[in-house]
Each structure stands twice: as structure tokens, then as C-alpha cells.
Amino acid sequence: NSGTTDQAEAPATDETTEETTGETIKVGVSIYKFDDNFMTLYREEIDSYFKTLDDGNTYEVTIQDGKNDQAEQTNQIDAFIQQGYDVLIINLVQSTSAATVIDKCADAGIPCIFINREPEEADMNLYDGQDYEGKYTYVGADARQSGKFQGELIADLENKGDLNGDGVLQYIMIVGDPENVDAKYRTEFSISQYLEVSGNEVEKLDEQRGDWDQAKGQEITANALVKFGDAIEVVFANNDAMALGASQAIAAAGRTVGEDIYLVGVDALEEAKQLVKDGEMTGTVLNDHIGQSHTAVDAAVKAVKGEKLEKYYWVDYVKVTSDTVDDFLN
Amino acid sequence: MEEYILQMKNISKSFPGVKALDRVNLNIKPGTVHALMGENGAGKSTLMKCLFGIYRMDEGEIIFNGEKVDITNTADALSRGIAMVQQEQTPILDRSIAENIFLGRFPTKKYGPLEVIDHTKLYAETDRLLKEVNMDFDSRVKLSSLSVSQMQSVEIAKAVSADAKLVIMDEPTSSLTENEVEGLFEIINKLRDNGVSIIYISHKMEEILQISDEVSIMRDGVYVGTWPAKELTTDLIIKRMVGRELTNRFPPRNNVPGEVIFEVENFTSIDPKSFKNVSFNLREGEILGIGGLVGAQRTELMEAIFGIRHIVTGKVTYKGEVLKIKRPRDAITKGIALLTEDRRATGIFGVLSVADNVGIASLDNYLDYNFVLNNKALEKVVNENIEKMSIKTPSSKTQIKSLSGGNQQKVIIGRWLANNPDVLILDEPTRGIDVGAKYEIYSIIVDLAKQGKSIIMISSEMPELIGMSDRIMVMCEGKVSGFVEGENATQENIMSLATKFM
Amino acid sequence: MESNKIKDFLENNAIIILLFALVVYVGLTQDGFLTMTNFFNIASNVSPRFLIALGVSGCLITKGTDLSAGRLVGLGGVLSCTLLQRVDYADKFFPNLPELPIIVVFLAVILLTGFFGLLNGIVISYLNVPPFLTTLGMQTIVYGINLVYSGATPLGGLRRDYTQIASAGINIGLPQPIKYLLIIAVVVGVFFWFLYNKTRHGKYMYAIGGNEHAAEVSGVNTVAAKLRIYSLAGVMYGFAGFLLAAKSGGASVNLGLGYELEAIAACTIGGVSTTGGIGTVPGILLGVLVFELLKTCMQFLRIDTSWQYIVQGLVIIIAVALDIRKYTAKK
Amino acid sequence: MESNKIKDFLENNAIIILLFALVVYVGLTQDGFLTMTNFFNIASNVSPRFLIALGVSGCLITKGTDLSAGRLVGLGGVLSCTLLQRVDYADKFFPNLPELPIIVVFLAVILLTGFFGLLNGIVISYLNVPPFLTTLGMQTIVYGINLVYSGATPLGGLRRDYTQIASAGINIGLPQPIKYLLIIAVVVGVFFWFLYNKTRHGKYMYAIGGNEHAAEVSGVNTVAAKLRIYSLAGVMYGFAGFLLAAKSGGASVNLGLGYELEAIAACTIGGVSTTGGIGTVPGILLGVLVFELLKTCMQFLRIDTSWQYIVQGLVIIIAVALDIRKYTAKK
Ligand SMILES: Nc1ncnc2c1ncn2[C@@H]1O[C@H](COP(=O)(O)OP(=O)(O)OP(=O)(O)O)[C@@H](O)[C@H]1O
Ligand SMILES: Nc1ncnc2c1ncn2[C@@H]1O[C@H](COP(=O)(O)OP(=O)(O)OP(=O)(O)O)[C@@H](O)[C@H]1O
Ligand SMILES: [Mg+2]
Ligand SMILES: [Mg+2]
């Protein structure tokens, strides 16, 4: 149903290679935070994709909520290991804690698939040349790419987003949560890419943190629209929830996306796609949870079967514009 | 008409560790004032609380107005026509007098389906009531701006205005001064004339004999008997209460005042309505009584000396040293102690044990290495004082809030005895304490004086002031109106000084 | 004497003066601040928070608290969204749900959150569990229920007639229509003022906060009063959630996170005593205004977000420290 | 009589019994639960939370509260991490920082958080700002400071000798070494027990909670006592942050978020009275255990996460409702 093709080199699960009929495989998943919109789609897809696997094994999937607290998540991982789980899929709360988790898993000999939040490179190389090499991997999308795509969405417009034609893009940025890498990269690369592609100058009118929250997105945008009025040409939001809030504020201020303002987000939430289709949002970037979750699950299965994993599996983001949005709509 | 408005039969009530009431009987005739007497902890308040629906009795039967009743809560009691003035005041400090009095039965007016409080009526009614109890206060004034005794008057006004058939008064006069007591008696007489019955609890013998028609006596949770007041004398009551004779009300005062050791000069409060230019001194081993009417600012003066209140001028000299007292701790470390007037507000630590309540002011004296508490030594002193004060408590670990009012007072006196100060200031020390125990406390005070400790005692009970003091300082409207030597002291000369500037 | 009066005035109105100074400063230095649009904008932000603060104020005045506020706002918002999506919206939560009358949904929402409030009240007054724990437990439970109900999916595609409640208003000839949100805030505020000052319930509430035992022995049914207070609080949270979702055009389980602390803080800034028995509706409004105006002003002044936290914390403490002087009696 | 005694016993130990039943049930039905590894796992989880709860307990016992706890834990953790990264770590926060002695860093951390605690105490006792607001303001300020300081970058690459504090232990001949974290918890617990029961400070603390006016009049320097209490609390938060960062191998500004509510809840479950004056160290431990054991048990029982919230909320309320019966005076 999703219009994307799996561009990742997903490790295909080859059912003929192993005769593991009837085994019960315990899969432990820890998500950094349950009420994150994107990770909700992601984890649901993990769960349902495991159910569709029919390689004779039964997969018992337990998904835990890291509650956005690394200490809590570490406890959960300890408990998983203690309970003898066969493979872990971990969406770290704090990407810098990867080393600790890898050590724990290596000690227990349990394969570990990191998703969504990328560990430091050094940590990914921790077990090079040792037994545990190839038993842990990172499956994810390159957060820089999502930022770059946002920048391109604007730069690719006919007027390059520069509504007043002064050669400078006046914008406001709604940041997710500064501690999150995605937020950081999207904030940074959306602009750097825009500069690069468009050749225009930029002027940041305002940058506020919206904590990924729709209500905050609305309030920040509403305030900014009062203060800067027509000066604002583009609203960059680190995610769609905040962009949706922004779109409320834009509509309420009597502005029209596409005519006197532009608005981009990331995630391609259903409603965001609708808005893109109706022209109320300039574009969004699909964070391909289907591709990513399937890749992660496939990697997990592969690891359980004793196959060696690559260090990274990359899944691409996809730009969604009014031209392409129909491919993505349900 | 029934013979009794109220019959309580075989009432029993236990608390963990105490049997507070053991098959108690009480019969009250309509239109009479019935005094209920007994030592501290005898169970008077508990019995009344069972009647008023604050406690559930374990067994027994209550017949009120000819009908067997089961009173489960105070709303129930009130609706049946029983009102009560509690021993422990329960004011709502941040609300007006009017709201305090009419809480639970506000006058309302209706606008269709809307029922709105009728403020005009509320304030008018309250003003009328206040006049009845001789208080010239605006009914909108917050309770927190009243003194303890004024709050007590409000409580009384509240109970009286409830249109009850039976009004219970649990030590209503313990924080009233003579004038106010007279006012109260007028009210009681009016009520009695209207056929209302009153159960009156007090430790003040004179009052009992003056106001009551019948007297019931309790001892240790057991009902002793009921007698017409006419047939009783103070000595008889005491005998039946305590179980033995008590010949003297005051112990012989054989302390000998020595040199002046403590001097207060020119104390003036920052509050212009409070004390002004007060100077006095105190000798070693002397008991200095302080007399005056309510509002004479005796309490404020003592609290200021103790560092609780602020002054604009004033100097305290103790043993030749000028003291800088910024907070009570400064005074205490110099050997000065103050038993405060308002037990609930500044006395007891409700949830803490009796032992902790006694020990709290003496911790400095029981430190090993200046740091670790010597709990053993502390415990010993605490237990000594619990015994000395004959505090009636299941154990020293019991929370103080579950003790009877008089016993709480004894605990706090015990606290300052344990602290062993050189100058002990007592503000109404025997409030709520029974006659027997009073004598013991007086003996302790005299003993302390004999050991060379100096005592300042504020008291609104004239006989106590006269019976105990070596010297009496009388205050009026914040100023010292004169001193009376102990042997010359009479009610008359104290009164005339107390009203000197009025 | 004169200088004393001025000092008294400053002391008694510290917060108002502070707020006023802030508004004047920002108004003079920043364009667009002293405009009607901004006024309505701020009013719309204040409105739902004012409702929440009013809801929680009853709990605070009776010496309780309500930590479940934020999560109940979230539940209210999510429930509203699931029931008020466009019929043609692709990702509809209940695909076959017909178009429901808004008022029905509104009632359902406030009934549900009111019910949870009632549960709080029951646990507090019948089981004697301290309000802090009761409502903290309820916070967790409500969040769990919301997760189970919504599956944590973000909800959008709201009907226009629903979102209009938050964005539109009544035209009375002014350059701009008066926002419904503002009208709602005023109406609810007046209702609460009336409730707190003119009804028995209000007096009982203050009495319970002042001295629960005294209220009890004066024949006040404290249990019933608390049940009413917590239920009403629940209703207000649902109401606020309903408005907030309309305002931001969607909701997810995260909606309302942390609003309880903000609301309690706003109440306290506005003079609601943490030790019970004290608090007025105008005070609460003032407290909410402090929070919201400060946020807006900082955004206008383009203060770095990280620094905004520091400033906000400092202002809260300083404002209250100045304000509290009028209560701390000089002895 | 006999049945009465049993009832009394059940009433007085409701929480312990509940906890015991839970452990036995999970132990019998789930593999790996009743093992030494799991014991140490749980002990390591409990340890930092116990420190935080002990810290906040003093504030609660004196009728205060401390909402800045969680953020101070975060600040402590972040500061520790910035100062204890591997010298060769590529993404080092202070690229030129030499290898510092751990003890120096530890002291710096607890001094800093202790200082913020002291500030809380000063504002509360000198400026008379209610503890709730003071510490809420401080929460925001500390978070802002942490954001400014760390630039919100997640910190990793910790030195092994630092992380070992959380993972290693002392070998005393048992199949597994006794974790340092466990030892720390025991030592700190004993220290607090001593402080609360055997020192003047402890008695003063209870007295202030019981009746602050009376305490002052009885010669307690309430200001000094509160300063000590809030400073010590700050120290404990820093300590816990230091350990937590070591335990999770890194930290970010989010560390400790919401820990204050959990700690306060744990204290209250363990019998610390929200109205002051009551609370014991064993009780606090019990309260923390309830929280942590419950979480672990639910994970072992594979309860769906959304439902875990519901169960946790219910258990808190029920446990306290049962437990509170021993305190509520029978009429
Ligand atoms: N709530 C309670 N919990 C436990 N024990 C109580 C409680 N209330 C009263 N008691 C005990 O019951 C006994 C009777 O107390 P009560 O207050 O009735 O005495 P009283 O006669 O009113 O004394 P006083 O003259 O001092 O007021 C005392 O031993 C007291 O300790
Ligand atoms: N002239 C007055 N009229 C009415 N009330 C007054 C007046 N002066 C003082 N008061 C109030 O009466 C209170 C009682 O004063 P204060 O406590 O000093 O009297 P006191 O002589 O110590 O009485 P007690 O012996 O009962 O303690 C004061 O706190 C004040 O609020
Ligand atoms: Mg009594
Ligand atoms: Mg007085």
C-alpha cells in the first residue's frame, strides 16, 4: 500500500536455508518512547510483519516502552537478557548509550538490532574482529537526508520559496526536541541544503522548540505570524505533527499555503499527505517505517539463524510533494 | 414532657491501648445546666464526641428527646438539635466570622432553580449574634485577626445560634477572661430559660457551682454519679473526682527571691496597638505573676522577649549580659524558656509521639560528640517528666494528638521542665488542667523557684495569680499599670490596675 | 506616609505590575505585539489553560491536588478527535462512524473525563488515599487507557465545523470577530466566580481547605463536596482537551503532557494557597496570564529557547517571592 | 480475637504482603526471576531511585516537596559525563580535558547539585515562596542551564573505570560479585537512617513537619534545618545522576525527567505523610521497591506496555488504599 519501493538492501529471509520448524523465538523490542507518532507506526509494523513471517518458527515479540528514559530502557534490556531472549531490537533513548548495550548483549551473546537512532560510529566498530562482529547492526534512515529533502522541497519550488523576491528566504524553524539527533539534523541540513541547491540567502526569523507537539506547533506559529506577519515565507517543522499545528495557525491567520507562505514537515502522516494533496502543505518527507521495520525484522531473523549481519542497513527517505502524493495516499 | 431530654446508657469506647469510656451513664433534664466533671483524661470529651457523632461508641445506647438515636455524624447531631463547642477550637482562619458561624447552614435565596447565598442576611444575622455575645466586630472580619479568646466567643456564638435543644460546651471558658465568662453565663441563663439543656464541662470549680443545676462526675472512664449542684461544695467535687481529699488549692510558697538577674527595659512593639515602653525586672528564685484583661498584650510582650515578635525598642539584660534575641533559639540557649499560650498553634506536634514532644527542646543537652543523640539519656529524662507531670498516655510512643486536652498541656509543660531553664515564662500554664493536677504543677513551680529558677507566669485566673506570685505586674492596654507585692494582692487592687488606662 | 502607601501598593500588586511592565516593554520594542490579532492570539492560548487551572483550583483550595489533569486533557482531546473526523478522511479512526453532532461529542467527552474526576474524588474521600498519589495513579491509568484506546496513532482530519470552534468567532462589528475561545473563557470564568463566591458549594470548598475537621463538625458533607470538586475538575479537563484538539487541528496521546504542573503553578502564582483555603478566580486568571504572556513575550523578544527556561523559572520564583510579601504578616 | 490479629497483621503490612505475593507469583511462573543475576539487576535499578527518594523525603517530611529532583539528576549525570569521557573519544565534549580523578568529578557534581538544593532552601525559607513553586521554578531553571551547558548533545564515550562503578562489584566469594550500586544503596540508607533517628537534625526535621511554629518556639532553627535538608537533597540527586549516567553509559539533558514524581510517590507509598512529620527510611525503601519490582514483574509477565501503565496506576492506588487503613483513625 505504501508507494515506496524497498531501496534498502534488505537481507532476504530465505526459508529453505534453515529447517527450524516449530522453534519459539523470543524477540525483545524496546522503543524509546511509546507515544512517538512515527515510532508507533514503526513498532506496529514490526509486530505485524513478524506475524506474517512463515518460516515455521513462532516469534514471540515483546515490545517495551523506554519512556524516554535511558536508565529505564537499560533496565528493560537487562531483564530481556535475564529472561533469555533470542534477539533484541533496540530503539535507543540515548544514542550514546549504545556501547553499554552492545557490551551487555555481547556478554550474553544475543544479537542486537539498533533502529531509528544511530549509535556513534566508534561504538558500531567496537567488536570488529571479534566473535560478536556481525551480530549487531544499525537499521535506519539517514536523518540528514530528511533535512536535506525538506530544503529541496522548498528550493525546487519555482520561486525557490522566495515569495518577496529579495533573494533571501525568510523562515521560521520549529524544532522537535533539541536533544534528538533527528531534530538537530533536520534543523541544520534543511537550511544548508536549501542554500546549496537554491543559491539564495536565508534569514532565520525565529527558531522555537515545539517538542514534536501539535499544540505547541500551533502556538509557536501563531505567535510568529503575529510578530513577523507577511515577512515569513517558509515554516520548517521538524515533524508533521508540528507542521499540522502550524497549518492551523496559518489558516487562522488568513494566510494560504502555496500563495503567500510555504510549509514543510517530515513523516508523511496521513493528514499531512491529505494537506499536501489539497495544497495546504507544500510537502513532507516520508520516513519509510515500512521499509525500515521490515529491514530490521529481516535482520533480526537472519541474526537468529546465525547469519552474519552487515554493519549498516540504510533505508531512504522519500520526498512527498503535491505531484507525487497520490502514490502515497491510502 | 419527658423527664430527660437525653439519656446515655452504658456507653463504652476504646482506643488502641485505652478504654476511654467504660459503661458510662448520663441523664440530662430539659432546661438545665448539667456540669460534667473529672480529671484530665477521665473521658469527658470522648463521651461528648460520641454524642455529637465525631466518634462512634463501641457499645451503649443514646435516647434523645424520647427516641433511641444512632448518631453517625455531626450533621446528623446538628439536625437533631445537638450543638457543641469543642474543647479544641476549630476555626477556619481565612474565612470571615459570618462564614464560620453559619458554615453548614448558610441562609440562601432562590432565583428560580438557582440557590444563592444570601449575603445580606448572612452578615445581618451574624452582626446580631455578635452583639448578643458582646463582641463589637464586623462580621466580615477574618477569624485569623481575632485573639484566641475572641475566636472562642465566635465558637460559642456558633453553637448558641444553632437553635439546638442541647448545647454541649467542652471547657468553653478555658481561654476566656472574666468579663467574657460573665457574658457567657448570661447567654447560658437565657438558653436555660428557653428550655435548652446545656452540658457544661470545666475544671473551674467556681463556675461549676455558680452556673450548674446538676453535676455528674467521671473518673478514669467510669461514671461516678450525679448530684444536684446545691448539695455540692468544691471539696466534695474534688474528692469525688480525684478519689481523695485535697485540702489546699496552693502549695506553701517557701521560695526566697534573691538578686535581680533579668531585666526588661523599654519594650515597644512594632505594632502600634500592642505593648509600649514596658520595663520590669525579675529576681532569682522569684515567681512574677502578670495580670491584666484580655488584650492587655501580656502574651505579645512575652513572645517579643522570646524573639517571636518584632520590637522597635527594648533591651533584655540577663545576669549582666545584654541579650540579642532574634529567634527563640537564641533565648533558649541562654536558659530562657516560654510556654506559649496557644497550645495547638505553637505547642504540640500533633503527629509526633509524647516522648518527642517532651524531648524536642532539650536535644542540645543530650548530644554525644556534639552530634549523635544520646537517646538513652534523653529517654530517661523524657520518662521522668512524663511521670512527674502524671501524664495519662498509653505509652510514650503515642501520638500526642490522641491525648486528652489537659494531658497535652501537661506534656508541653514537661517539655520545658526537661529543658531545665533558668528563666521560665509560663503563659496560662494551667489552662484546661484539672484541680488535682494544678496543685502538682503549682508545687513544681514553687520547687523550681526554690532551686533559684525565676518564673514569669501570665494568668487570667485571679486566685491563681494571687495564690502563686511573689509579685504581680499588671498590664493595661499594652502598658504596665503597676506592681503589687504578693502579700498585698487582692482581686480588687489588681482589677483597678488592669483597668487603669481605660 | 506617602512613600509607605506606594510601597504597599507595589507589594500588593507585585505580579500585576511585573506583568504590566513586561507587556509595555515588549509592546514598545517589538512590532505586532500590541495588536488586536496578538490579543486574540494570546487569548486563545490562555483560554484552555485557564479552564484547566480553574478545574485544578478546587482541588488545591481543598488542600488536594490533581496530577491527572494533563492526561485527562489528552484523553479528552483524543476522544474528541476520534469522533469528529471528516467522513471522507482516508485514515479515519472509526471508518464507518457517521457525522455526529458536535454537542453530543462534547457531552460525551466531558462526561468521560468528569467520570475519571469522580473516580479521583471517590478514591480520595472514601479510601483516604492522599490526593497526590491518587491523581498520580490516575494520571498513569488514564494515559494507559488513552494508549490502549488510540493505539498512540496521531489523529487528524478533523471536521471544519469542529476546528472552527477554536479559530472562528462572533462578529460584533470590531475589525476582528471576537474569538469563541475568548467568550468561552469569560463565560466559564464567570461561572466559577459565581460558584466560588455565591454558592454553598464554594463556601464549603473554602471551609474544607481552611480546616476540614471544622467543616466536618459544622455539618458540611465533605465527601460530597470533594466528589463535586474533582468531578467538575475532570469536566474542565475534558473541555480544555476538546478545545485544544480543535485549536491545533489534531491530537495524539501526548496532548496535555505536563499541563497539570503548569496549571498548579499558575494557580499558586495567582495566590491559591498550597496549604488550602485560599484562592480567587481573578487570581487564577492572573497566574495563567503570567505564564502565557511570559512565553509569548520571550518568543517576541527572540530569547534563545534554552534561556527561555531559565528566565521562566526565575520569573516564577521572583514574582511569587515579591507577591508573597503581602501575605507574610509582619509580626 | 485470633481472626482480629490476622486482620490487624494484614492491615499493617498490606504493602509488604502485596509485594511478597507478587514476587512469589512471578518467581514461580517465570524463569529467571528468582536468580541472583536478577536480584542484582533489580538492586541496581533500585539503588539510584532510592537515593533520590531519600533526598526528597526530607523535603516531604517538613511539609515541602522538591520538583527539581529529576532535573538535578539530569544535570548531575550530564556534568559527570562531560568530565569523564575517554581521552581518545572522538566526539569529546571538552576535547582537551585531561583524565580527571573520578572522585574529583564526583565531588564537583554533588557540590553543584547540592548548591542548587541550597538555593531551593534559601528561596523557601528566606523568601517564603512555597516549596512547590520554588522547586518547580528551579526545575525549569536547572533544565535550562543543562541545555545551555550541554547544548543538548547526548554524551557518550565514558571511561570504563567510571561505568564500572555501576556494573562491577566486590567479589566476596559468592557466585557473583556484590554490585557497588547495592553497597552504595545500603551505605546511604544506613546513613539516612542514622540521620533521621540518631541526630538532632533528624528530630528537628520531624518537628518542623509536625508543627513548624511549635518547632521554632521550641528552639529549632527552622531556617537552618531547611537549608540542610534541601542541600542534602540536592547532593543526593547529583549522586544519583552520577550513578545513573554510569549505569546507562551516557547521559543527555533528558536524564531524570519525571523522577521527582516517582520519588515522591515512592515516599508516599512508603508511608511518608504528605501532611508532614511522618516517614521512615525502611518505608521509603519499601516504596521504591514497590515501583521497581512492579515494573520488572510486569515485564517478566509480558504484560502489554499500554496495560502496564494501567496496572501500575491501579496497584499504586490499591496498595496505598489498603495501607492507609492502619493510619486512618477508626471513628
Ligand atoms: N482519638 C483518640 N485516640 C486515642 N486515644 C484517645 C483519643 N481521644 C481520646 N483518647 C484517650 O481517651 C481518654 C479520655 O480522653 P478525653 O479527651 O475524653 O479526656 P477528658 O476527660 O476530656 O480530659 P481533659 O479534661 O484533659 O480534656 C484519654 O486517655 C485519651 O488519651
Ligand atoms: N483594644 C482591643 N480591642 C479588641 N481586641 C484587642 C484589643 N487589643 C488587642 N486586641 C486583640 O486581643 C488579642 C489579645 O491580646 P493579648 O494576647 O496580648 O492579651 P493577653 O492579655 O495576653 O490575654 P491572655 O492572657 O488571654 O493571653 C490581641 O492579639 C489582639 O488581636
Ligand atoms: Mg477534654
Ligand atoms: Mg494573649
Image: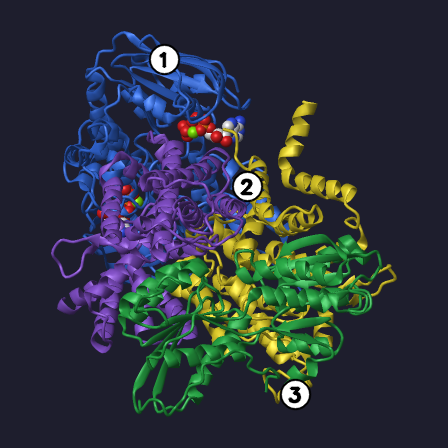
Chain colours: A green, B blue, C yellow, D purple
Q: Quadrant of ligand 3?
A: top left
User: Which amino acid does the dot numbered 3 rest on?
Assistant: Pro
Q: Which marked residue is nearer to the observer: mark 1 or mark 2?
A: 2
Residue assigned mark 2 = C317
Label 1 sits on a secondary structure element that is strand
- Give the chain of mark 1: B
Whether residue D33 is situated above or below residue B312 in the rendered picture: below
Q: CA distance from mark 3 to mark 2?
A: 50 Å
A96, C203: nearer the viewer = A96
According to the image, label 3 marks what residue?
C98
Residue extending farthest to the front is A129
State how far apart marks 1 and 2 are (Cα).
54 Å
**Which amino acid type is shown beneath numbered disc 2?**
Ile
- Report which residue position mark 1 lands on: B484
Q: Nearer the viewer, residue C104 or D127?
A: D127
Circles 1 and 2 on the same subunit:
no
- The span from disc 3 to disc 1 (Cα, nearest Å) is 93 Å
Where does the image place residue C123, in percent across and percent down from the top left?
Answer: 41, 66
Q: Of the residues shown, which amino acid type is indicated by label 1? A: Val
Image location (x, y in percent) of residue A127: 35, 64
Q: Is residue C245 above or below residue B368?
A: below
SS for tag 3? Answer: loop
